Structures are given as structure tokens and as C-alpha cells.
Image (cartoon, rainbow, N blue to C red):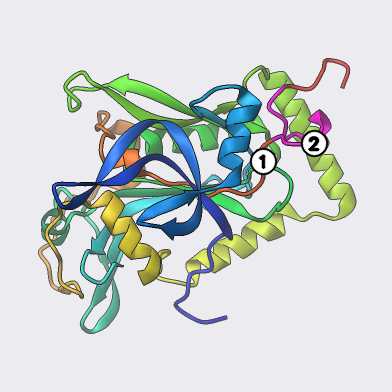
């Protein structure tokens, strides 16, 4: 395995709740109140819609896609959702520094270094360069590719905090069977002081529409037994994913970084290709997990609106309820 190359979950497409539009000669993110599934191909500066997008809208009988039946590839919450502070170089389209509020990995002229991370509010480099929370959620849609995922990227505190809480809670109540739960991504709205009372959209992870918690846990138990009988080793899969992600300093490649910087860092001043190694550090440390648990909600507008996820197979299309991938709960006799 190539050292320094992060081995990330295979991505089949993206899930967004916004898009990048051109306005006054600038490409800026624009919020939306629905999901859009796109492929990983662009045409004319726009991401090409994935076929699943139209299929899901037809299945649900609604013009706006506000819920997506999903499964999770891993049983460990932090493997499904990776959240950290991130600083990107707008010129080169590559990550410069990522940290959790305690330690960070930073690119310098001397190479990669590990330093203390006080968080963007107390870091001179982060404050001047647009460091912000950055989350990536991988989910499975449908049965066609059980190891292929769609990715949702966001810099919104509301989505990151809500998704992190849901993953840990579902992991706890399911007896660590998170990867066997049939769940659903759903768009919610809220108003905050930062949004001046205007509604801000964020992404939540919930039970599927029409399912009870008891039915969801029963389906998770059935699926776990089925997988164990066929030799599916979830613990080994989680270990492989953890080792792969730890193999690189940064998850995003320069190719992905350019598109991410355009979506999540519009209008930010350009940074240098390499970050200085001796930037001033505050003695105050705030771990990202602590900020998510205690910080007042921060508006997700703009940055959240251009968040993205990647497609796989139609959720529930052509599958039986017993597979756990349908959008309706199993019958009481199942």
C-alpha cells in the first residue's frame, strides 16, 4: 500500500443540498431545500444528475427529494462520519491543515508535521485562511454495491452535530449493530440568530418513514444473523477501513480539493501553497467533539447548502422488505 495515501470508502456519487452557481462573475454556493443525487462527472460546470435521483423522486411521488433510505457501511460511528477542522489552499486545491481541536496535521515547507490545534477561533493560520469544521458522511443506497457509497460533505455545525449524535445513539440502542440498521437521511429546517430568523436547512439521520424503533431493531437483528451465516465479517471490514483512512495525512486528494474549496470556501482569500510551521498557537484547546456538544447552533446557510453526497443504487428499488432496504416497514408478521 502506498504510504501517505488515504484509502477512503469507494464513492459512487454525491448527495447535495445545494449547488454552485455563477453570479457577478463568481461561482458561489446556493442553498436548496431538497436533496440532489449527482454522479462524479461534470458537464458545463454542473454535476451530472445520477439516475437514482429521478428514480427516488418517482418512487416517493414528490417533486422534491427530502428523504433518502440509506444503510451505513461501518459499525463504528467515526468511520461513517469523519469530522475535523480543515484548511484548504484555494490556489492549489489541496488541504493544508486538518485537526480535531487538540492536535493537527499540517503541511509545511519542511514536510508534514503534527502540532497543537487550538481550533479556528484561536489559531492565527486558521483564522486568516478560512479553517472551518468539515464533515464527510458515507452511506449505502440500495443493494447493487454493498461496499460502494454516496458521500455527503458539509461545513455546517447543525448537520455535523446532529449526524454525530444520531450515529452514536443508534449504535448504542442497536447493540453495536449500526451497519445493519435501515435508516433514512432527511432534510430539516431551523432558524437561528445567525440566520436572522430565516430557515436554515440541515441533514438528519432518522428511522425510515413508517418504521418503528422495534421494527428497525428487529430488521437489524435479522440482517446481522443473515450476514454472519454467510461469513460476512463486519469487524474486519471496520478494521480495514480504519487502517486505510489512517494511511494518509489528508483524506482529500488535490483533484477533490479544488472542487471542495470552490463549494465551501467561496470568496476566501488565497492561501500559500504550504502553511508556515511556526504559526502562533493559543494555549486554549477545544476539541471538535466538545464544540459540537456545547456550542450554540451556527448557521449552515451558504456552506451547508453546497454540501454533497454520492450515489449508489436505488434505495428500495426492486428489493423486498426482508432485505431491509425498502422505504416501508416490514409487516407485523415478518
Whether residue 144 is situated above or below residue 30 in the rendered picture? below
Residue position marked by numbered label 1 in the rendering? 314
How many numbered marks appear? Answer: 2
The answer to whether one can see residue 114 in this image is yes
> Residue 173's x, y, as percent?
63, 29
Quarter containing the C terminus = top right
Q: Is residue 287 magenta?
A: no
Observer-nearest of 53 and 128: 53
Q: Farthest residue in the bottom direction?
A: 110
Is 83 on the left or on the right of 319, as rendered?
left
Q: Is residue 317 left or right of residue 269?
A: right
Residue that mark 2 sits on: 323
Q: Is the C-beta separation of discs 1 and 2 under 8 Å?
A: no
When the figure is inspected, residue 193 is found, relative to residue 126, above or below; the finding is above
- The magenta stretch is 316-328
Residue 289: name its quadrant: top left
Checking the image for residue 306, the label placed there is none
Task: Please provide percent x and percent y for residue 138.
Answer: 53, 49
Q: Is 32 left, or right, of 236 in this rendering?
A: left
Q: Residue at x 35, y 56 (%)?
A: 45
Of residue 326 and residue 102, the one placed in the foreground of this image is: 326
Of badges 1 and 2, the one in the foreground is 1
Amino acid at each position: 500500500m502506498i504510504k501517505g495515501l488515504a484509502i477512503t470508502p469507494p464513492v459512487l456519487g454525491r448527495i447535495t443540498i445545494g449547488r454552485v452557481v455563477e453570479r457577478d462573475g463568481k461561482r458561489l454556493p446556493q442553498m436548496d431545500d431538497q436533496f440532489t443525487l449527482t454522479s462524479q462527472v461534470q458537464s458545463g460546470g454542473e454535476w451530472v444528475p445520477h439516475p437514482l435521483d429521478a428514480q427516488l423522486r418517482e418512487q416517493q411521488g414528490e417533486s422534491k427529494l427530502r428523504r433518502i433510505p440509506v444503510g451505513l457501511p461501518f459499525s463504528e460511528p467515526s468511520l461513517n462520519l469523519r469530522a475535523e477542522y480543515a484548511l484548504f489552499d484555494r490556489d492549489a486545491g489541496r488541504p493544508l491543515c486538518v485537526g480535531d481541536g487538540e492536535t493537527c496535521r499540517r503541511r509545511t515547507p519542511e514536510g508534514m508535521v503534527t502540532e497543537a490545534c487550538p481550533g479556528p477561533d484561536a489559531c492565527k493560520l486558521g483564522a486568516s485562511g478560512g479553517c472551518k469544521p468539515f464533515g464527510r458522511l458515507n452511506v449505502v443506497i440500495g443493494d447493487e454495491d454493498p461496499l460502494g457509497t454516496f458521500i455527503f460533505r458539509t461545513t455546517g455545525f447543525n448537520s455535523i452535530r446532529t449526524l454525530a449524535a444520531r450515529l452514536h445513539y443508534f449504535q448504542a440502542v442497536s447493540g453495536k449493530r449500526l451497519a445493519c440498521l435501515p435508516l433514512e437521511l432527511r432534510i430539516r429546517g431551523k432558524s437561528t440568530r445567525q440566520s436572522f430568523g430565516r430557515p436554515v436547512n440541515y441533514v438528519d439521520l432518522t428511522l425510515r418513514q413508517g418504521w418503528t424503533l422495534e421494527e428497525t431493531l428487529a430488521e437489524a437483528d435479522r440482517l446481522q444473523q443473515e450476514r454472519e451465516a454467510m461469513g460476512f465479517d463486519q469487524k474486519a471490514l471496520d478494521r480495514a477501513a480504519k487502517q486505510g483512512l489512517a494511511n494518509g495525512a489528508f483524506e482529500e486528494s488535490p483533484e477533490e480539493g479544488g472542487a471542495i474549496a470552490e463549494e465551501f470556501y467561496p470568496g476566501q482569500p488565497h492561501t500559500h501553497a504550504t502553511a508556515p510551521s511556526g504559526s502562533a498557537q493559543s494555549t486554549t484547546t477545544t476539541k471538535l467533539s466538545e464544540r459540537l456538544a456545547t456550542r450554540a447552533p451556527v448557521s449552515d446557510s451558504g456552506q451547508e447548502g453546497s454540501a454533497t453526497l454520492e450515489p449508489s443504487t436505488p434505495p428500495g428499488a426492486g428489493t423486498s422488505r426482508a432485505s431491509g432496504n425498502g422505504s416501508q416497514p416490514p409487516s407485523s408478521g415478518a
